[in-house]
Image: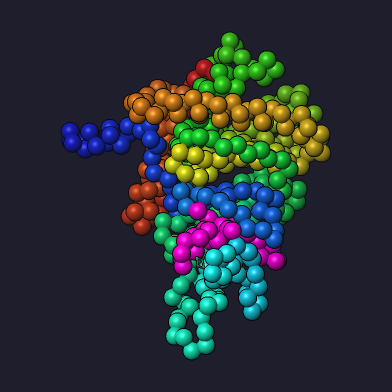
């Protein structure tokens, strides 16, 4: 039995704040697609309110450093990539200090003269762990500069296409900025009830034809999965992908939703990845993988749809911001808002498990949810 005080504390924790909660640390985020990280140039980025400069070494290895020179704070992204005695470095444009791309250590200070006692190894700029995997650049946002990832970024079965061994290849993606806290963006992504209203389209669907739905969910390692639907055989899916279509949708922390469509011949994976830029701004990418040649054609048709879809979400997030500015209390109703309750529960457990230095213990239980959408 909970006493009054802890019940109140729990209720307060459950309160859904307009400002949004903590941005999760010690976890992988999608920084961008591999194609966006062009070689030979420095990319000025911001993740979780931290300025980051990203680039590639000559062999293509991605790197990420804090975008503030420790000398006098000039952004390193305004400098250049240079070879320093066989080591790749970024040179600051103000006084030419150079920092190794690999570990951020200071490799050169041009103004020092022979015999001046100065220990370069005392100076360094924060280096983030970055990995190129499945045609994406992932960045690990540690809670401290020393924090290292305890495993690789997540993979989804259907990213591994073709022969089961090859890397996923991004066939198509769209990107949009959302002027809101990441929590509202993720909740919008998970929210089944907004679809017929925000994403109505004469071709797609309208808000006048709501149907009752029942979905089965189970916990996964870092989130939850809408269990594969019974095989559906819709003519369009069959033509595009093959017979015996099975669809499953996964959500996992911090902000990834993967929808996979699998048939006896081909598969498709749509990954929505949200990355916080600042507390009040985030970006979303809709990233698609597939191995059906027919989808290469469909891409031309899909482009305007995906753009429209993202713009519809961006517009509603902006509108929501008008109201959130007044910090109103927010509501959650059964069952359409349950996924949002789960998201916030997952987040709390992630924060708690990191603080307590223990393994993440997924708080989600299997459930069947029903709504009209
Ligand atoms: S500010 Fe970067 S070298 Fe001086
Ligand atoms: Fe949406």
Residue in front for this viewpoint, 186 or 342: 186
At 41% from the left and 60% from the top, the residue drawn is: 144
At 40% from the left and 47% from the top, the residue drawn is: 350
Identify whether 284 is placed above or below 38.
above
In magenta stretch: residue 52: yes
At 73% from the left and 43% from the top, the residue drawn is: 171
Q: Total label count? A: 0
Q: Which residues are magenta?
A: 51-78
At 56% from the left and 21% from the top, the residue drawn is: 198
In magenta stretch: residue 64: yes
Q: Is residue 1 at least partly visible in the picture?
A: no
Would residue 361 appear left or right of 231 to someone viewing this image? left
Identify whether 283 is placed above or below 194.
below
Residue 286: % across, % down: 63, 38
Q: How is the image coloured?
A: rainbow
Residue 331: % across, % down: 37, 24
Q: Is residue 48 at least partly visible in the picture?
A: yes
Would residue 193 appear left or right of 81 to someone viewing this image? left
Identify whether 65 is placed above or below 350.
below
- Which quadrant: the C terminus? top right
Residue in front for this viewpoint, 76 or 238: 76
- Residue farthest toward the left in the current orientation of the protein: 4
């Amino acid at each position: 039995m909970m006493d009054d005080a802890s019940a109140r504390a729990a209720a307060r924790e459950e309160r859904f704040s307009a400002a949004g909660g903590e941005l999760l640390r010690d976890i992988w985020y999608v920084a961008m697609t591999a194609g966006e990280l062009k070689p030979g140039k420095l990319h000025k980025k911001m993740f979780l309110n931290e300025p980051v400069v990203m680039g590639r070494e000559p062999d293509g290895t991605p790197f990420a450093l804090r975008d503030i020179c420790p000398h006098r704070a000039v952004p390193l992204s305004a400098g250049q990539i240079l070879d320093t005695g066989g080591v790749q470095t970024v040179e600051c444009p103000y006084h030419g200090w150079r920092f190794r791309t690999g570990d951020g250590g200071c490799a050169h200070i041009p103004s020092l003269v022979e015999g001046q006692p100065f220990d370069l190894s005392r100076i360094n700029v924060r280096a983030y762990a970055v990995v190129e995997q499945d045609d994406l650049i992932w960045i690990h946002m540690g809670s401290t500069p020393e924090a290292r990832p305890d495993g690789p970024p997540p993979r989804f079965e259907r990213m591994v296409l073709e022969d089961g061994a090859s890397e996923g290849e991004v066939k198509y993606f769209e990107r949009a900025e959302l002027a809101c806290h990441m929590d509202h963006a993720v909740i919008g992504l998970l929210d089944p009830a907004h679809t017929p209203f925000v994403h109505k389209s004469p071709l797609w669907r309208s808000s006048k034809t709501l149907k009752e739905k029942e979905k089965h969910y189970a916990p996964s390692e870092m989130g939850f999965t809408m269990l594969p639907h019974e095989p559906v055989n819709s003519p369009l899916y069959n033509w595009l992908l093959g017979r015996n279509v099975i669809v499953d949708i996964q959500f996992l922390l911090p902000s990834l939703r993967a929808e996979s469509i699998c048939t006896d011949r081909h598969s498709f994976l749509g990954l929505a990845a949200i990355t916080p830029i600042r507390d009040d701004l985030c970006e979303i990418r809709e990233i698609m993988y597939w191995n059906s040649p027919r989808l290469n054609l469909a891409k031309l048709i899909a482009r305007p749809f995906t753009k429209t879809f993202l713009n519809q979400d961006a517009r509603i997030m902006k509108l929501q911001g008008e109201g959130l500015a007044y910090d109103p209390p927010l509501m959650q109703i059964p069952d359409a808002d349950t996924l949002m309750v789960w998201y916030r529960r997952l987040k709390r457990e992630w924060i708690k498990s990191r603080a307590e230095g223990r393994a993440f213990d997924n708080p989600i239980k299997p459930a069947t949810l029903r709504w009209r959408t």
